[in-house]
Amino acid sequence: MTSNLSLARSIMWMTSVLLAGVLLGATISFLIDQDRCGPEGFTHGFSISEIPSSVSRDEVVSTIREAAGDEHVNVYKMSPSAQESVRSTDYYVFIGEETLVIGDLDQGAFPTFGTQFPATLQPAAALTRDRLLGTYLVQGDAQQAQGIVSSLERLGIRAPQTSSPPSSLLWGIFLVGSPWGIAVLILLSALVLAAANLASVRLAIAGLRLTTGMPLSRIRAAEGCALLIPVTVCVALSSFALLAYSLINLNGYQARTILVIGAQQLVIVLIAAASAMGLVALSVRNHSIGRIIKGDRPMRLLTVLSATAIVIATAGAGGNTAGTINQITEFRQAQPADSFRAANPELVKPVFSYAIATEEASEIFPKLGEIFRTMEQQDSVLLTEAGILSSFIGEQHAIDPQRSLLINSAFLRTLPSVDPELKEAVDSRAGQLGAVTLVIPADLSEHKDAIRSSLDQWLNFQLSLNEDAPDQARPNTTVLTGVDLGIVPRLDYDATGSSMHLVDPITVIIDADNGLLSDDFYGDVGAYADQDKYKQLVDYAGVGHAVVALESIAELSALDHANRLAELRITITGTIVMLLVLMLGSIIFAAVYHARKATAIFLLASTGSGFFNIYGRFLALVGVLSAIPAFLASAVVKISVLPQVAIVAIITAIALATTSAMLLALKRSLTRTALEVT
């Protein structure tokens, strides 16, 4: 009894610590991610997409400022910028209630939970006309936001209200969509199992207390505390640590969100633990006090819960391990691409203002496109644009449309792994009207007709959009098949979450002077090598207000590398957690089986039966429960056969080894008292 109770307590505390640690990591990741979306506590705002030409910049600023004062709220205008070559956010504040201003206006400091997404605080007077467009956050309720919107409408500006749920409510959505979610789900199932196991072991204690005349309410309270204290302490301590960090280092920023999330987590884990206690009570409702005092436990319930935990843990571990292998492969493939971008620190990409989202965009993009053409003639701009054929490659062909890549000849010349003969062939056609080179990798050579047809459709579509195309401009495509370009880095950082390199892509090589693509197409693409020249041309063209900053490609690459490394660590952590849950589930599964079959096991051991004769069928069941979910989960993730077999073998071996070790330990402690169990 004592050993069973100690083991059950240890498993309960271990599960609680693991669950609290994973919840802490998930909360930190969420709070850092929220730095991109805006400050804490904002659920209402409005958006300005267009300002009539008859309304001056000063009129807009003064109207918002006066309305903020009337409503006694602060209004923050969000605007993208670059801080030390890293994407950041500028907040321009219209002060209506000085005591509630977030950040330090004198220092220009705006709080963020992490350092990954920095922000600054500026006075509203620093806003230029083009930066007046976009999203405004109101530090108040919907009625106060409507008061400001009404003031703008009287000025002739349409500013529809926007709203979003509190960040504390978004935590669940973030959890479901992140790698942390699977780990939390598996640990919750493990918590239910651990709590049910502890509750079942403590049934005898509760029975003895009942026979001594202790009130039922006190017994329930004592048993509830014994089950709920471990998980409550662990989750509360993790939330307290996060809250202390906020209060000490951030002057309480995100403290309210941390408290709400902590309360949500506490409710979830308490419900899970309480449900386990309820299941145990329901399972033994018809058992006599005598049976309970003798150590009778709801073995069928524990068998189902432990088997479920094993299945969930092995499925999660199988899928996560396969995903980890893919991430490691992706990480290694990305290294040459990262090295290429780091070796070209002069490359920058423009950050555009909200001006490109207005009617003025029809004037801005052609000018920016002309700047691209000018700088391409000087080999000062490199072009990569992934997925250009995604809308034209049919689903009937086994081709990943995101594998297509548009580049210019200047970029091709920078790739050291490309055959010099290919570079010469492309250069010989550079400048020719309609010249296009299509490079198809060896593994897709059989689909060359489909790829060529898709490219022709895309080119004709782009040509139809180019009103300034020469009359004689027609696609003149040269197709090269069986050419593998290896790992090709991307420079177009406009698709969050997509891989910033391609392996042996379908490559379309076009220069801007071939007359096929419009100035509008080139307006917002390209990585520029001479930022001083680019700024000069932008200012000369009169579109300087549309380009608010220049981001370093190398810095973006370093940030992307850090994000990928963080995601890899999260995935590895999740895999380790799932394997630990698998081991805990296997331990409880073995203990339950041993308790149910104690008499038969004792008799077999007494007659000299070997370990595998006694436990062979049970170990086979554990192997099946481990192997099948691991195989199915790893099959969902695209991975080759050999690693998949290795994953299933390792996970099954861990489950069998843990189960065997537990059975051996229990077998040694088996005595004649097992015969008393009926």
Image (spheres, rainbow, N blue to C red):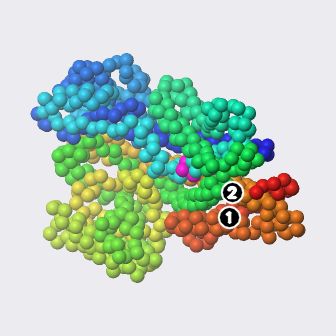
Q: CA distance from mark 2 to mark 1?
A: 9 Å
Image quarter in which the C terminus is found: bottom right
Mark 1 — residue?
A: 622
Going by the image, does 62 lie left or right of 385?
Answer: left
For label 2, the SS is helix
Q: Is residue 606 magenta?
A: no
Q: Which residues are magenta?
A: 183-187
Q: Residue at x 44, y 74 (%)?
A: 441
Q: Quadrant of residue 598?
A: bottom right
- Evaluate whether residue 430 shows in this view: no
Is residue 184 on the magenta stretch?
Answer: yes
- How many numbered discs, if any? 2
At horizontal 54% and vertical 64% (from top left) the residue drawn is 633
Kind of residue at badge 2: Phe
Q: Are marks 2 and 1 in contact (CB under 8 Å)?
A: yes
| Near-viewer residue (100 or 188) | 188
Q: Which residue bears the numbered disc 2?
A: 589
Please name whichever residue, 429 or 437, is drawn nearer the observer in this view of the structure.
437
